[in-house]
Amino acid sequence: MIWVRLFVVGFLWTRAQAQLSAVDVEATDPKEDEAGAIANKTYAEEHTSLQRDIFMNYNRNLRPIKNQSMPLKAQAHVYIMHFSVQEQQQSMKLYGHIYMTWFDEMAVWEPSNYTNVRSTMVSQWQLWQPEIKVANSIAGSGQYFEISKRSHAALTSITSTMTKVEIYPTFSISIGCNFDFSDYPFDEQECALRFYNSNPMSEVELLVYYELKPSVMLAWNDTNKKFISNWMLENATANISYYYNREYNDTRPETAAEKELTWSILVTKIKLIRNCQHYWVTLAIPAFCSMMVNAFSFLFYKSELSILTVIANFFIQLIFMFNELVELPPSAGEPPRIVRYSSYLLFMTTLALILHLLIRRLRYKKIPVPAEYVKRFKGTLARIKRLEQKENEPSEVLEGSSESLDSDSFLYADLTRNLCIILYFVIGIFLSFFLLVL
């Protein structure tokens, strides 16, 4: 009986506790339950709910403005992270980011309904965005994968009816350029990257972000780096050009009819300066030395030694020509100055060989020069060398000595040799100054 009584008392006590708990739950304030639920809600859950509400009725194929007759203005800014110049293909490959921002009137929310959340991140493909293409891409303007579509978009609520959208897609683009290497190695090249939107200006208009120049960051956390390979990025500018009636111009159309037939183009111009430090050692100085060898070859009295020197100079030039084929850029338009200098050098070397053969023939025949010509030549030679003492040898010859007529000073061979020395030195220095230095 005692066990039965204890069981009944315990059962009644349990029922009483359950009834008291039920009364406490019913008496709890509903506002406290709501506050607790909000407090226990995670950051991810809050943003998931926000994004679900934003895109519930969102149409990413429609421009996100309520007045569809007005154009949407998108601002853009280019970040250049790396470049590579392909001289043979007359092209340049650019790597970087393009920052774009605009206002969206459809992807909006009231921050107070979402615990004052004013910004969120979504996938780029979920939003309407300007369809940016590259006008001068060597792969064609219809390429889809040159500009990334897989980046994220940042949404910032400005008002309950307007949201600021920011995207930061990467790009890897090869563009065609018009390079002119005629001033190698002091040439400066300019190439333009042209972004445009497939919609006409009456629907979407591109603008330069706060009129800022493109940002150049060729190294991580180092904005001072400007050199890549043999090129230095001197400057980068951005402006808006307009394509209307198959022509490019910088004048913004004003009438609605013109805007319907006009496309705005974001033009990023990149100026490059060649940085060829080894030009003098590998090309210019060897070519100049070969030019001087031709002149010095006329200083030898024996024609055989002069001929061997010129032939050896031919082989030296062939060695440097192989080096030129590797170092020199392709000839687009006029050839580089070093190429013209090498052409003149090869011609003058060939001419020097012919002149040495002629001098050898003249010396063999020992043809004398008339005394009058000898006098004029020695007077000219004296003025060039700026000698202080006047030469008296021509007058001695005119007195009529048989031995003087056989003297080397009065042979056509030596006259030709002396003239060639002067001409080759003057022409060599003249060509070297205007084609290698200037």
Image: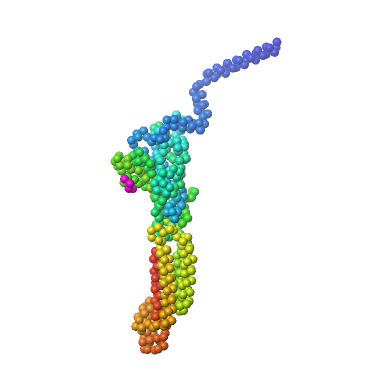
Residue 81, x across and y down, in percent:
46, 48
Instruction: Report the quarter where the C terminus lies.
Output: bottom left
Q: Is residue 224 visible from the viewing direction of this image?
A: no
> Is 389 or 278 nearer to us in this picture?
278
Q: Is residue 395 at least partly visible in the picture?
A: yes
295 above or below 234? below
Q: Quadrant of the N terminus?
A: top right
In percent of width and height, residue 235 lies at: 41, 52
Q: What sort of colour scheme is used for the picture?
A: rainbow
Inspect the magenta stretch and tell me whether residue 191 lies in it: no
Does the magenta run of residues contain 248? yes
Residue at image point 43% right, 51% down: 92
Point 55% across, 19% down: residue: 24
Q: Main secondary structure of the magenta part?
A: strand
The image shows residue 40, relative to residue 358, as above or below, that is above
Residue 393 falls in image quadrant: bottom left
User: Quadrant of residue 266 in the image?
Assistant: top left
Per the rendered image, the range of residues in magenta is: 245-249
Q: How many marks?
A: 0
Q: Residue at x 42, y 79 (%)?
A: 361
Viewer-side residue, 37 vs 135: 135
- In percent of width and height, residue 85 lies at 45, 53
Choose between 414 and 347: the one closer to the eye: 347
- Indicate the quadrant where residue 370 lies: bottom left
Residue situated in front as seen by the camera: 324 or 259: 324
Residue 206's place in the image compared with 310, above or below, is above
Relative image position of residue 427 (x, y in whole percent): 39, 70
